[in-house]
Amino acid sequence: MPELRQNPITKQWVIIATERARRPHEFIQKKTDAAPLASYVEKCPFCPGNEHMAPPESFRIGQDGRWQVRVVPNKFAALASDGEVSRTTQGLKRTVSGVGVHEVVVETPDHSLTTALLAEEEVRQILECYKQRYFTLTDDPRVQNVTIFKNHGVSAGTSLEHPHSQIIATPIIPPDVRNRVEEALRFFDDSGECIFCKVLKEELADGVRIVHQTDHFVAFIPFASLTPFSLWIYPRRHMASYGEIQDEEMRDLARMLGTILAKLYHGLANPDFNYVLRTSPSEYRYCRYYHWYMSVIPRLTKTAGFELGSGMYINTTLPEVNAEFLRNVETPVAAAMSASKAESLRG
Ligand SMILES: [Zn+2]
Ligand SMILES: [Zn+2]
């Protein structure tokens, strides 16, 4: 019989098809005949040498006049960076002026790459860039929330090839973010515990949905995963805000994120995906009940009328089976690392 499972934090329900579930290999993407991408594309505003085609840069990491990661305002920004926040209410009609920041993080100078193929140090620089922009943007009194995310591939919302992610700072806290914080606070009031720390403890004890572990992070497919292969990456240490991540933890997160994206890339043949950094809004920065994490969401299925009508999802796969599948995907880095470990054991 199918099973309804509930996300303990958002309270969202998902129907898991337990018996007629699709097998992981059914989700391996078909190879296309498209030619491999070039490292440099003349018309690409994010390739080195074409910097004049994008708005002036707001941040960069690099040396000797060359950049490795760079942040530029989005040319087609959803929000205006100048102006003051003003609110109006007329009857039930409430508006807030569209003031905020919409930036593009250009993740590498090489047009042909994807995050899964970057070196650990290159991923670390992207994560460092997120932290610096998070600090700068949350310092702006007009900003109430910063969303850091990546769209990879057409099904994930982008047709732009050059590896990039985005940051949007809004003048309001979205209800979705507020609800997560409030549910976590309610749980903390009832139990005296951080619900995220507790979820992590239970997942580690169950073990069956764990995909990968590092010194400071754990990646797992949630018990009530809404869509096939959706993953959470939790820091082991309790931290409400991504801004609290320390240097060593960031190196470790780079290793973790690189490994997870490589597992998807090699295991499912480069699926489209989104990832989102779910950090607390800045005023909850030191709170004991919220705990930041990353969601990685491969876009392998489409949502339709039932999801729109009910807010519920149907997942035609088993989180436990998918976790086992991803656990067993060897990534070149992991393979190279285990080979060198074997070598050192032999020596
Ligand atoms: Zn490019
Ligand atoms: Zn916690």
Image (spheres, rainbow, N blue to C red):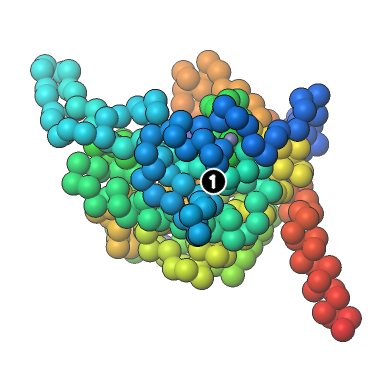
Image height check: is 314 above or below 133? above
Residue 66 at x, y = what percent? 52, 53
Q: Residue at x 57, y 65 (%)?
A: 252
Residue 96 at x, y = what percent? 19, 27
| Nearest the eye: 159 or 150 | 159
Circle count: 1
Residue 139 at x, y = what percent? 24, 52
Residue located beneath label 1 in the image: 107
Q: Which type of secondary structure does the marked residue at label 1 adopt? A: loop
Q: Is residue 320 left or right of residue 83?
A: right
Residue 101 at x, y = what percent? 31, 37
Quarter containing the C terminus = bottom right
Picture quarter containing residue 76?
top left
Seen as rendered, the residue at the extreme right is: 346
Asked if disc 1 is less than 8 Å from ligand 1, the answer is no
Three-letter code for the amino acid on which mark 1 is drawn: Glu
| Nearest the eye: 170 or 324 | 170
Q: Residue at x 33, y 63 (%)?
A: 288
Q: Is residue 339 visible?
A: yes
Q: Is residue 296 visible?
A: no
Quarter containing the N terminus = top right
For the residue carrying disc 1, how many other residues have a C-alpha within 10 Å: few (<14), some (14-19), or many (20+)? Answer: many
Seen as rendered, the residue at the extreme bottom is: 347
| Nearest the eye: 179 or 266 | 266
Picture quarter containing residue 143?
top left
Q: Residue at x 56, y 30 (%)?
A: 44
Which quarter holds ligand 1?
A: top right
Q: Is residue 54 left or right of residue 28?
A: left
